[in-house]
Amino acid sequence: MKISKRDFLKIAGVGLAGLAVKPALRAIAQAERPVAAPKSGIFAGKRMGMVIDARKCTTKDGCRDCITACHAAHNVPDIRDPKNPGLVDVRHEVKWIWTEPYRNAFPTAEQRFMDEEIERKPFLVFCNHCDNPPCVRVCPTKATWKREDGIVMVDWHRCIGCRFCLAACPYGSRSFNWFDPRPFIGRQNPEFPTRMKGVAEKCTFCEERLSRGQAPACVEACKEKAMFFGDLNDAKIEARKMLRARFSIRRKPELGTSPQVYYLV
Amino acid sequence: MYDAGKIFAGLIIFILLVTSPFWYNRAMGKSLQMPVPKIVTTERLCVLPRAEMRARHMALLDNWRQTVVRTGERTYVTEDGRRFNMSLTLTCMKCHPNKSEFCDKCHNYEEVQPICWNCHVTPEEKPK
């Protein structure tokens, strides 16, 4: 049998088109089932932030209620110095919320002569959920990103442990899991995941609690009612009233990160 | 062909060696059986039909995690309108708290090692 060049090309073309049928059918058959479509912009128009009344905070010296509550809720490991179990292992510690003296928390707002009480007082510090977060800019996998409501989130599934974010954050808000944190967690909260070796973590403004309509764990745990949380775009909330009534400072605002944790001093 | 006898003898020995685990199991009377995951819940329906869950639960879980972590949307609506919190720990493991008999059985058989439980906490199982 003789086939003309034209017929040969026709048959070859149909044959090639046939090859595409199976993948196409498979793609249709495996198309994702409908998951509840995300309500468009459930966070839109919001700017979550925190206001800390530094005068009320630590009126009772040594109070660690918010830190304990946060770290228990989020399975944050308590890593101790192996040589001296009384001390925290500063090279490997994981922390979401902790205290710093004024000169460390606000190094560029230091004055030569200051109220001694402020100089001595521990200031509560945690992730500032910056409007312009440097950690997000450097993350090579987009494991950390800013949500529409301003919360800077970490997707621990996606983090590859490069630690760029630890270097980028000017507040030291991020911690790295240098080893499996599980043996260092006192009592696990079964409702919240732990982390694994090789991921970065930090405060998430209790995103999981907000979704249930609860306030962040630290705010709830504060007996002095020194922490105010909410959508700072809403001028009617308590936090905004406090900001209007009193003078506030932020940590290293000159860096242009626009931190969203305000301290009333 | 040179040394055909040696080559074929070698090949037969090689094949016997490679398949020896099967012969060993056969000799010990342990035939290879499909694992049957133990379902302890009294609930009749999962979020998807059973066959679909068997085949595609990993895709569903992947979808859930992306949706929850990335978009913040936490409610999953099934085709017949039931609502679920998209959570491995809080939803799946409530009905299937027996990870070793439910999850691990097939995963071990299939030699897949999902890393879900490196972070997600599993319900405590009574040691047998």
Image (tube, rainbow, N blue to C red):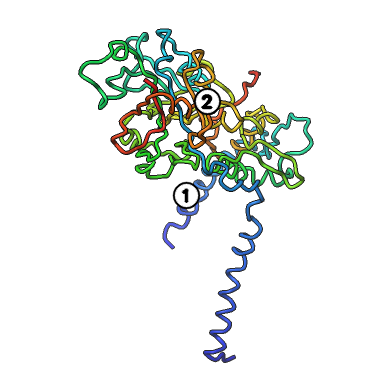
Please report, as a chain letter, where disc 2 is located.
Answer: A
Please report, as a chain letter, where disc 1 is located.
Answer: B
Badge 1 crowding class, 10 Å Cα cut-off, few under 14, some 14 to 19, many 20 or more, is: few
* Tags 2 and 1 both on a single chain: no
Q: Quadrant of residue A175?
A: top left
Q: Which residue is mark 2?
A: A216
Q: Taking the image as drawn, is residue A91 in sight?
A: yes
Q: Quadrant of residue A105?
A: top left
Q: How many marks?
A: 2
A163 or B107, nearer to the observer: A163
Q: Residue at x 70, y 43 (%)?
A: B77
Secondary element under disc 1, as helix, strand or loop, is helix
Q: Residue at x 33, y 9 (%)?
A: A84
Secondary element under disc 2, as helix, strand or loop, is loop
Tag on residue B10?
A: 1
B30 or B60, nearer to the observer: B60
Instruction: Return the x and y of residue A237 as percentages of the image width and height.
Output: 53, 29
B122 horizontally vs A138: left or right: right
